[in-house]
Every structure is written in structure tokens, then in C-alpha cells.
């Protein structure tokens, strides 16, 4: 029923757009959408792009265009809704695809398995203060802010907001919103009992919190007492930060904040929301929208800066375009091109596949796995969708042995680098790539051993693991040495890999067992240091700026020690400490040096086999409507997802 | 009727009656065959369940051929090797028979070594191809393992599970039902209400809850035993009711009174005098309970709550077959389902025949 309706709406919209395009005569105008940008890699003081210059170079004021969706909706003209210097979109580098000026209209349909969270839409909605095209981390460009400046010593960061930037309800964004987010939320111990690590000097537990200064209505400064070169990438990338931590709509949230709200009104709101008397913290938290909550019911009515605004929740979540969105294309069209988003809740991944096959999904990244690609691909022409094989922005399933598990004999064995090397030598990485990834991956270049069972067995003999009568190796405690894998049942490929590893390690005489456990149980057991061996992906090997090289999985206690500044957990040995320092040093360094440091991390892991990274260049399939433009199979799938505001439906 | 009929023992009469049930008569030897297969799976399977043919992942079944590509007939059957290609367009693996590689099937072939019955070491397989070449009559799974061999090995857990589960059920059922029926009074009331309670809980969720409660650190053998206990804990109720009902009526009979008067103990009366008078019912109920237990194990393993890979049972094998992908491109992965259907049907036929035979005087 709904589909028919939306199809009609879409048809009408397409017609209007086609007519308009004819009038303006810009339909064939194809140009790259990159704004002149500065790179912190150059080091030293690097001012952001001069916004007025870039804007005028692209489109003279007054020639901005809006979607016909807004026609007759009694809104101010589009030029007044956009900031004085709108952002010329640059979500992906030119190497990904040649940017096409799109046409307005249509609804993008997705599916999700979580009642409130749609990962595909959440990524589209994510808008950081500064961004890095293609998520590559190679250059940092202004996004929500108009420009930024980094001091020579990498300690002070100055940001200037776009003049005339407005929340989705039309209220201007000023430094007062930043001051509110910083002073009244981050530095409010009631709302933020644990100060966020990434806002301390060099994201170090022992570091001091940042200093904040409002310069004028549009400019603010963030400074640290130690160099923090990685701060910009923290803003652009780490953990899908978005703008939400440093920029909050004060005019919406102040009525839930004790400092600003009228006590009687506040108490009334608390009562209405069903919280205990005086519990304004709970009330505020329930109203404030975090970066990860873009599709949550509380986003209804919450002023945002993202391309879309939530209009309906429930099993079907709907978004409409944000009239005040700050991005334009080179022809002066206000983004996004697609008018609406719609996310439907389904039972399981099989349903996702069925929906894709029926042509009822316009974009699905999160739940499509390689084994399903042939099936989806088969129906490509009938279903009107297309499967792109991009690359995965992380590894898929690394093998971890817990080096800090509480068992002396186990520790002594697995902490012996010869033992870990032996296990790595026994892995047949080509077979893994072929079986687990259907050939859509390459053996990793970090730990690049070729399978050699003789050498592996020799190493194990050296470690002192003798074989018993039945050919199994005996541990240092005199009992049979067993590696018990417990893997989360959330990802089917973990078990496939596990079964394969059991067989590949069998010629070493090592008993390996495999158990699938619930995802929640996996979490608890991992945090409690109860997992001896497991399989889990890590972003570090692929996204160089990320600090997650699985330390919390292959050495939970060392990781705790490091993150708590030595208060919890156990102190890592020298070689491991070196790795932890290497990884942390990425945050302090300016980009060019950080990229070099990254090689040292790879080498350290390659020499020490802390955990087994068997594959790289893993394919990430994504199924999209065949008519969607501005998408390609170059780069990470997630980077294309992130650039969702640039998509449009070709007629 | 002849005189021999009148003087025949009860068991002989039952056998006669049973023989009249055609389906049951066919089911009995077939079931025996299935169980023998499970016992001697190492010898009967051409491959080990964990042997991987790395070039043959998700490969369709090989055809057993007698006529080669030139139309010549061979008395010794053979299979062709497969050539695997990944279609660059559709990303599918396609397998085509490679007529250049012909592998004749031999009897009593030397292959991978296994332990028959768990202790006799051997490397002779009933049939197979030589030199470790691939033979998979029912195709392979995603790791390139022979499905036929895996089904045979899987039958060990699946088939024995039914037997072992029901044996334990029988013990629980007879003891608790016996106590309830023989003693009567408040003991009976308590036990009967407990049974009411147990019956009222929907079985699958209860199984799932109990199975989820089994410690995840347990080994496959422990899990297996744990699951048997779970099934028996729930399944004994039906049997206990039957036993109780029978005992309630039998304990009023004269021969019970006679035994009691001659000073026989309770246990002796129950097990020597009362139980033998309804053995036949017990056998029928038990036979009918076996397929339910087998299906239960399959269901739980299918849901990932029971026995887990790398252990093989039919349920575990079917777990691989629950995706859309399987139905579309690897339908041979559904073979274990055929074995389950066959086993359950055979047990139902047998049970049916036994029920007819149970009361030969009717």
C-alpha cells in the first residue's frame, strides 16, 4: 500500500525535478565536489579553507536551489536557510567516483534488525565537526565548522562556526551551543561522571582535561597542555563521533537542565517522563541525542544538523530532509538529493535477503555477508538492485589467545613468542581467504608467514610442549594443552573460521575446541577476563588511526592497566608496553609522523604475533538500488554509506 | 485354530500379530541397519567427517557412473573429479565434471585411519577411491567436507540420543509412576500435580531454557549427557501416568494380595509381579518416545542450543542448511533432513506394529 503511494509521490517529484532541471539547464553539469582544503599533515599552523572564497567560487549567492519537496511549505528562501558560506560537499575523494550533480526526490528504504537502531541510516546521519574524505584519514577538511586552525605545537585548536548555520528548527548555531555542551554537560560532573578520555591531553588517562575558550559568537578554542596532533582525527572519525559531544542545541535542552530551567517546570517535566523526583540527570539524558542515537525515538523533535530529520518512529522509522542542512553541490543545489529515508524492522538476516531480492531495499550494508552475494547477484537484473563489492573498513575475524588469562601454565605458554609464531605458521591463510571469504580477501601483510608445519612443530618442541601417546601436546602443567575457542554467535563467519582453525592446528598436536556463545555472554566473559581464546574483528589493521588492535581481547588485564593509568589490571611486559606506547603515540603526532609510526605498529605486531591477523583487503558487499548515483565499488563500503547525502535516484 | 495357537506363549502370539503389520515388519530391519551404520560409521564412510577437500567447497554430489564419456560401459563404477570456477559476474562457484580425471570406486579401500567402535584402529573403508581423491556422494559443505560421511558420523549422536534419552525416561517414568500408583494417597497426589505442572509448560521453550542453562564450558560429551538428562526430565511424565494407571488397577488384583500376604517386599511386588503384566505397554510407549527425542535433539542443535560443531549430529548438519543460500544453491545440504524423516517414520511404523501386537489376546 505504502510502496504504491511512495512510488506515485516519487514519480511526481521526478517529473517536477526533470522540469526544473530543464529550466535551469544544469542537468548535464558534472563536476568534482571538492572544496579547497588544508591538511594538518603539513604541520605547523594550518588555517582552514577560506569559506567565502570557496562559496563564491562555486555558486554566487542567490543561485542556490532547493528540493521541490519544500515548495509551498512556507519556509524562508533556501539562500536564507543555508549558512552564508555553505559547505561544498566533499565526502569522498575523486578517486572513488566522479561526482554527478544529482536530481531531487525519492525515498531511500533500508532494513534493520534492531528495534530502534538502524546502522545504515545512522552512518548517513553522522556529521562530524571536521571530516576526512573517504574516511581515509589522509586529509582533514572543515565540515560543520567553517574553518579550523592548529597551533604549531599541536596543543591549541581554533574552530570557527559557519555564519548563518541553523539547527533543523531554524534556530542559529552559535558558540553558545558549544559553551553549553562543554561547560554545562561535559564539565558537569552530574551529567558526565567519567570525563571522556579523548578530551584529555593526548587522550591519555593521566592527562588533564582540555581548556575551552569562547572567542566570539562564532569562534571557540580548545587547548591541551600536551601535544595532541591526533585530535582532529578524533573529531573526524573515531567512534563515529559526530558533532553531538561538542555542539548541543541549547535552546532545546536548556529546559531540561537544572542550571537554566525553571524549577517548577523542570519538576513537572521529570514527573511527566516518569523519573524520580529531582532526578533531572535522568531526564536530561533521556532527551539529549547522542551521536549513536540518530534513529532513536528521542530524535523526534530534537534539533539536528544532519541531512535528515526524524518524523516517525516504530517498526517503520521515517526521516524527511532537513530544510536547514548546510551542504550544497557545485551547482548550488542544497543536499541531500533524496527527500526521505525509511527503515523497516525485520526479524532476521534471512528476511533482509528476501527483502533485497524482492527489490524492497534501496541500500543494505550492515547485514549483507559474502556467502549471500551469489544469491543476491543472481537476481540483480530482476530486482533492480546492484551489488557493489567494496572493501571492509576493519578486519573480519582475527584470532585471539588471551595472554592474561588467569592460569600460570597457560600464560607461560601463550606469552612465549615462539608458541604464537608456531600457531601462525600452522595457519593456511590462502585456505582461510578461500573458505571464509570465498576468495574475496588476501592473506595479511602484517604477519606474513607461509604455512610451514615442520617449523611450527619444531618451535612447539622448543617451547617445551611434549606430545603424549595419543599425539596431543601436554601443557607445562602436565595436562593436555587445549585451546578452547568461545566465539560470539552474532557473526556466522566466526564459527566457520573456528572450525577451519581447529583443523589447521590439528597437525601440531594441539587440541582446539569451539563453542558459540551469545553475543552478550561474550561481552561479559571478555570483560571478566574469562575467555581463553576467541575470534573477533579489529579496526586497527585497516583504519590506521584507530587504536583498537584487539588489546582488550588478547590481553584484557594489560589493557585495563594501560587505560586506568596503572590502577587496575596488570602491568604489561616490556615488549607489550612498547606496543601500547606506539599505539597511543599516534594521538599526539601530526599526521605525517603518525603515518610513519603506524608502520612501526605493524612491524611490532608482525614480530610478536600478539594476535593472528590472517587476512586483509576483505570484501564488504553492499546492495543498493541500481538507480542510485554517486556510489561506486572503490574504497570502504562504510565511506560510501557515510556519504549518503550525495546519493540520488537516477531517472 | 490349531492347538499350537492355544498353547503358544504370550511373546509368540505377539510376534504373530506383529508379523501382520507389514510396515512394521519392514521398519524393524531397516532401523537395525541404521543403527549398525551408526556403530560402524568409520568403516562405512569413505571419508572422515573432518577431512577437507579444499578444492571442492560447497560442491554438488558426484554422480556414480558406469558409462564413461566415450559411451563405454565399466563394471566398476567411477566418479569424475570436478573443475571449480568462480564466475566473475555472479560470484558463484560452479563445478563441472572433469572427464580427464576419473576415479574408480573400489571396495575395502585404504584411506584415513579411524577407530572402529572407539578402540579398533583401522584404515580400511568399505568403499572409496584411492590415493585420497575426492568421493562425495551427497556433496560437500562450506569447508569442503564430505556430507555423506558426516551424515553417517552424525547418526551416532542422533540415533543413540533417542535410545539413551528414552532409557533414562523409562527409569524415571517407571520409578516415579510406580511409586505414585502403588502407594497412592498423598504421595500420588503430589506426584500427579507435579506432572500436571510439567505437562502444562510448553516443551520447546522449556528445552531451550534448560539447554541454555548448560554451562558453556562443558565438553561435547558432557553436553550430550546433559541434554539427555534435560529430555528425560521433561519426558518421563507421560510414561509415569501410564505406569501409575496400570498399577492402580493391578494392585487391587488377587495375585497382588497373594504376594503381599506371602510377605513379599514392595519392590519385589512391583518389579516381579506388577510390571511384567504390562511390559508390552511399556515397550510401545518407549518406541513411540524415541523419535520425539531424536527430533528434540535435532531441533535444539538446529537452533544452536544443543550439540555444537565441530561435533556432528544431524541437527548440527541441518544448522548449515537453514539459509536462503542453501535452498537456492546448495540443496544437497538438506540430505540430513531426509535421514531424520526416514528414522522418525520407521520408528512410528515400528511403534504402530508393536501397539497392535501388544495385546495379542484381543
Image: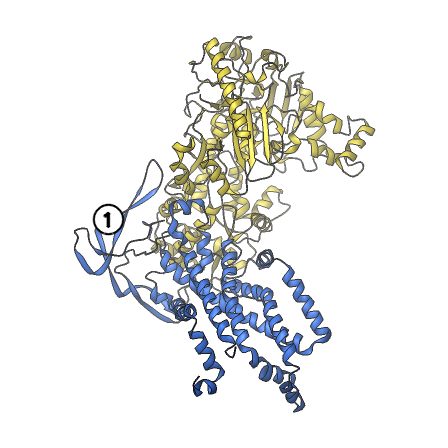
Chain colours: A yellow, B blue
Give the residue displayed 59% in from the left and 29% down from the top.
A318
Disc 1 chain ID:
B
Residue A213 in the image: state x and y as whole percent: 67, 22
Relative vertical location of residue A173 with respect to residue B184 in this rendering, above or below: above
- Looking at the rendered structure, the number of numbered marks drawn on it comes to 1
Residue A274 in the image: state x and y as whole percent: 76, 37
Residue A162 in the image: state x and y as whole percent: 60, 16
The residue lying toward the viewer, choosing from B217 and B313, is B313
Question: Which residue is farthest right?
Answer: A264
Q: Is residue B71 left or right of residue B266?
A: left
The residue lying toward the viewer, choosing from A249 and A371, is A371
The residue lying toward the viewer, choosing from B7 and B117, is B7
SS type, badge 1: strand
Q: Is residue B314 left or right of residue A126?
A: left
Residue A46 in the image: state x and y as whole percent: 53, 19
Q: Name the residue under label 1.
A: B98
Relative vertical location of residue A646 with respect to residue B289 in this rendering, above or below: above
Q: Quadrant of residue B237?
A: bottom right
The N terminus of chain B appears in which quarter of the rendering? bottom left
Question: Could you tell me if residue B24 is visible in this image?
Answer: yes
Question: Which residue is farthest bottom?
Answer: B262
Amino acid at each position: 500500500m505504502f510502496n504504491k503511494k511512495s512510488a506515485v509521490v516519487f514519480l511526481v517529484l521526478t517529473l517536477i525535478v526533470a522540469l526544473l532541471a530543464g529550466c535551469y539547464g544544469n542537468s548535464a553539469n558534472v563536476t568534482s565536489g571538492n572544496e579547497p582544503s588544508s591538511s594538518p599533515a603539513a604541520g605547523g599552523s594550518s588555517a582552514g579553507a577560506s569559506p567565502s572564497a570557496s562559496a563564491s567560487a562555486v555558486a554566487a549567492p542567490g543561485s542556490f536551489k532547493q528540493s521541490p519537496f519544500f515548495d509551498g511549505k512556507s519556509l524562508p528562501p533556501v539562500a536564507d536557510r543555508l549558512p552564508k558560506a555553505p559547505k561544498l560537499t566533499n565526502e569522498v575523494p575523486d578517486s572513488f567516483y566522479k561526482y554527478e550533480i544529482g536530481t531531487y526526490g525519492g525515498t531511500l528504504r533500508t532494513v534493520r534488525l534492531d528495534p530502534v537502531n538502524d546502522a545504515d541510516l545512522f552512518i548517513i546521519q553522522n556529521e562530524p565537526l571536521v571530516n576526512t574524505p573517504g574516511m581515509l584519514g589522509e586529509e582533514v577538511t572543515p565540515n560543520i565548522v567553517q574553518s579550523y586552525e592548529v597551533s604549531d605545537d599541536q596543543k591549541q585548536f581554533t574552530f570557527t562556526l559557519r555564519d548563518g548555520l541553523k539547527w533543523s528548527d531554524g534556530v542559529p548555531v552559535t558558540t553558545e551551543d558549544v559553551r553549553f555542551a562543554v561547560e554545562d554537560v561535559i564539565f558537569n560532573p552530574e551529567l558526565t561522571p567519567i570525563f571522556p578520555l579523548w578530551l584529555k591531553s593526548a587522550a591519555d588517562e593521566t592527562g588533564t582535561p582540555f581548556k575551552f575558550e569562547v572567542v566570539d559568537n562564532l569562534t571557540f578554542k580548545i587547548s591541551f597542555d600536551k601535544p595532541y596532533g591526533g585530535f582532529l582525527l578524533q573529531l573526524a572519525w573515531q567512534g563515529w563521533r559526530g558533532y553531538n559531544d561538542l555542539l548541543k542545541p541549547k535552546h532545546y535542552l536548556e529546559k531540561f537542565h537544572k542550571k537554566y530551567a525553571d524549577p517548577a517546570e523542570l519538576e513537572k517535566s521529570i514527573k511527566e517522563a516518569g523519573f524520580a523526583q529531582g532526578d533531572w540527570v535522568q531526564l536530561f539524558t533521556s532527551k539529549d541525542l547522542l551521536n549513536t542515537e540518530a534513529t532513536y525515538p528521542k530524535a523526534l523533535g530534537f534539533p539536528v544538523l544532519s541531512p535528515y530529520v526524524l518524523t516517525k518512529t516504530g517498526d517503520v522509522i521515517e526521516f524527511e530532509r532537513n530544510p536547514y542542512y548546510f551542504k550544497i553541490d557545485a551547482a548550488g543545489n542544497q543536499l541531500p538529493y533524496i527527500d526521505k529515508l525509511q527503515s523497516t524492522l525485520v526479524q532476521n538476516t534471512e528476511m533482509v535477503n528476501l527483502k533485497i531480492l524482492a527489490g524492497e531495499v534501496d541500500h543494505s550494508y550492515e547485514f549483507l555477508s559474502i556467502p549471500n552475494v551469489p544469491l543476491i547477484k543472481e537476481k540483480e537484473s530482476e530486482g533492480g538492485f546492484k551489488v557493489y563489492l567494496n572493501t571492509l573498513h576493519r578486519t573480519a575475524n582475527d584470532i585471539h589467545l588471551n595472554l592474561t588469562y588467569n592460569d600460570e601454565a597457560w600464560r607461560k605458554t601463550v606469552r612465549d613468542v615462539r608458541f604464537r609464531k608456531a600457531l601462525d605458521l600452522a595457519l593456511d591463510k590462502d585456505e582461510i581467504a578461500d573458505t571464509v571469504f570465498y576468495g574475496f580477501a588476501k592473506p595479511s601483510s602484517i604477519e606474513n608467514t607461509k604455512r610451514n608445519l615442520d617449523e611450527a612443530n619444531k618451535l612447539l618442541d622448543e617451547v617445551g610442549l611434549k606430545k603424549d601417546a595419543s599425539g596431543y601436546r601436554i601443557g607445562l602443567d602436565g595436562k593436555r594443552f587445549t585451546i578452547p575457542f568461545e566465539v560470539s554467535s552474532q557473526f556466522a563467519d566466526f564459527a566457520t573460521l573456528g572450525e577451519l582453525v581447529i583443523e589447521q592446528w590439528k597437525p601440531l598436536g594441539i587440541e582446539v575446541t569451539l563453542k558459540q556463545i551469545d553475543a552478550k555472554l561474550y561481552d561479559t566473559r571478555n570483560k571478566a577476563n574469562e575467555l581463553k581464546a576467541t575470534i573477533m574483528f579489529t579496526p586497527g589493521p585497516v583504519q590506521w588511526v584507530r587504536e583498537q588492535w584487539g588489546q582488550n581481547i588478547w590481553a584484557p588485564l594489560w589493557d585495563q592497566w594501560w587505560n586506568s593509568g596503572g590502577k587496575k589490571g596488570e602491568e604489561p611486559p616490556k615488549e607489550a608496553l612498547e606496543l601500547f606506547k606506539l599505539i597511543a603515540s599516534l594521538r599526539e603526532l601530526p599526521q605525517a609522523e603518525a603515518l610513519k609510526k603506524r608502520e612501526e605498529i605493524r612491524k611490532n605486531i608482525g614480530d610478536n604475533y600478539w594476535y593472528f591477523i590472517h587476512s586483509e583487503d576483505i570484501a564488504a558487499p553492499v546492495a543498493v538500488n541500481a538507480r542510485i548515483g554517486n556510489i561506486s565499488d572503490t574504497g570502504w563500503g562504510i565511506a560510501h554509506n557515510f556519504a549518503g547525502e550525495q546519493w540520488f535516484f537516477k531517472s | 485354530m490349531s492347538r499350537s495357537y492355544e498353547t503358544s506363549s504370550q511373546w509368540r502370539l505377539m510376534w504373530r500379530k506383529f508379523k501382520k503389520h507389514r510396515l512394521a515388519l519392514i521398519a524393524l530391519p531397516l532401523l537395525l541397519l541404521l543403527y549398525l551404520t551408526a556403530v560402524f560409521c568409520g568403516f562405512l564412510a569413505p571419508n572422515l567427517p573432518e577431512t577437507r577437500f579444499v578444492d571442492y567447497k560447497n560442491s554438488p554430489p558426484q554422480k556414480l557412473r558406469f558409462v564413461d564419456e566415450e559411451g563405454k560401459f565399466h563394471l566398476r563404477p567411477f566418479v569424475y573429479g570436478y573443475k571449480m570456477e568462480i564466475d566473475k559476474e555472479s560470484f558463484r562457484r560452479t563445478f563441472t565434471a572433469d572427464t580427464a580425471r576419473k576415479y574408480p570406486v573400489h571396495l575395502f579401500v585404504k584411506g584415513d585411519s579411524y577407530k572402529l567402535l572407539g578402540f579398533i584402529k583401522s584404515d580400511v573403508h568399505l568403499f572409496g577411491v584411492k590415493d585420497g581423491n575426492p568421493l562425495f556422494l551427497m556433496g560437500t559443505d562450506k569447508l569442503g567436507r564430505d556430507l555423506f560421511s558426516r551424515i553417517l558420523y552424525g547418526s551416532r549422536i542422533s540415533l543413540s540420543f533417542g535410545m539413551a534419552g528414552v532409557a533414562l525416561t523409562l527409569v524415571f517414568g517407571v520409578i516415579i509412576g510406580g511409586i505414585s500408583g502403588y502407594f497412592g494417597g498423598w504421595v500420588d497426589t503430589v506426584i500427579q500435580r507435579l506432572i500436571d505442572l510439567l505437562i502444562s509448560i510448553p516443551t520447546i521453550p522449556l528445552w531451550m531454557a534448560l539447554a541454555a542453562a548448560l554451562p558453556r564450558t562443558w565438553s561435547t560429551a558432557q553436553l550430550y549427557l546433559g541434554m539427555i538428562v534435560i529430555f528425560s526430565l521433561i519426558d518421563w511424565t507421560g510414561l509415569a501416568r501410564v505406569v501409575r494407571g496400570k498399577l492402580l488397577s493391578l494392585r487391587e488384583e488377587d495375585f497382588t494380595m497373594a504376594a503381599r500376604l506371602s510377605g513379599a517386599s514392595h519392590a519385589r511386588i512391583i518389579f516381579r509381579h506388577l510390571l511384567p503384566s504390562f511390559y508390552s505397554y511399556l515397550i510401545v510407549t518407549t518406541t513411540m518416545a524415541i523419535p520425539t527425542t531424536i527430533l528434540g535433539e535435532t531441533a535444539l542443535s538446529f537452533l544452536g542450543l544443543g550439540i555444537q560443531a565441530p561435533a556432528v549430529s544431524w541437527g548440527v548438519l541441518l544448522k548449515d542448511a537453514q539459509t536462503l543460500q542453501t535452498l537456492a544453491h546448495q540443496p544437497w545440504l538438506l540430505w540430513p533432513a531426509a535421514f531424520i524423516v526416514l528414522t522418525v517414520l520407521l520408528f512410528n511404523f515400528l511403534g504402530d506394529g508393536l501397539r497392535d501386537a501388544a495385546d495379542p489376546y484381543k
